[in-house]
Amino acid sequence: MMNKGFTLVEILATVVILGIIAAIAIPQFTPTTTQANTSVVSSDLQAIRMAIEYYKIQHSDANPGTMVGVSFVQAMTQKTDPDGTLNPAGIRGPYIQRVPTNPFNALSTVEEDGVLGGGDNGWHYDTTTGEFHADTDGQTGL
């Protein structure tokens, strides 16, 4: 009676072939991931920058986060009065539901008025100029 199955040589040959295919295919996905992350960051930046402009329209051209005791995140995610004071019954805002996660470093923190770069935070916001950027090492030009 004959046993049916694979020999060790056949199994090793299959594993080697699969390894070669994986070595060729996996590097092909890296640029696609980077492109997808860049697209997500660009879309998030556009949405937040539009929300900042809308905030400025409703608050006499003041940048969010410039009111004493109110951070950028609070100004953008909570209701405010026309002068920028936080007020749960306020008639302005919220402008965004939450700060998105930066896909390059998986952070959603916002650094206000610090040094752009390094990737220690998800985003960087300048309260003086109103500029909002991705804070990702190597991708800070976004």
Image (cartoon, grey):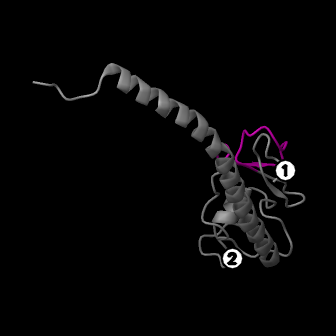
Q: Closer to the observer: label 2 or label 1?
A: 1
Picture layout, residue 16 above or below residue 67: above
Lateral position of residue 105 relative to residue 60, left or right = left
Q: Secondary structure at mark 2?
A: loop
Using a 10 Å C-alpha cutoff, classify the residue at mark 2 as few (fewer than 14 neighbours), some (14 to 19) or many (20 or more).
many
Q: Secondary structure at mark 1?
A: loop
Picture layout, residue 137 above or below residue 73: above
Q: Is residue 114 magenta?
A: yes
**Residue tagged 2:** 92
Q: Residue at x 42, y 30 (%)?
A: 14
Q: In the picture, which quadrant includes the C terminus?
A: bottom right
- The quadrant holding residue 86 is bottom right
Q: Position of residue 102 (x, y in %)?
A: 67, 50
Q: Is residue 88 magenta?
A: no
Residue 125 in view in this figure: yes
Query: Residue type at mark 2?
Result: Arg
Using a 10 Å C-alpha cutoff, classify the residue at mark 1 as few (fewer than 14 neighbours), some (14 to 19) or many (20 or more).
few
Q: Could you tell me how far apart the alpha carbons at marks 2 and 1 are, in whole angstroms?
A: 31 Å
Query: Residue type at mark 1?
Result: Gly
Most frequent secondary structure within the magenta stretch: loop
- The quadrant holding residue 12 is top left
- The quadrant holding residue 129 is bottom right
User: Residue farthest to the top?
Assistant: 8
Q: Nearer the viewer, residue 23 or 83?
A: 23
**Residue tagged 1:** 141
Q: Position of residue 114 (x, y in %)?
A: 83, 44
Lateral position of residue 53 relative to residue 106, left or right = right
Q: Position of residue 51 (x, y in %)?
A: 73, 70
First in sequence: mark 2 vs mark 1: 2
Q: Magenta stretch: give its range.
A: 104-123
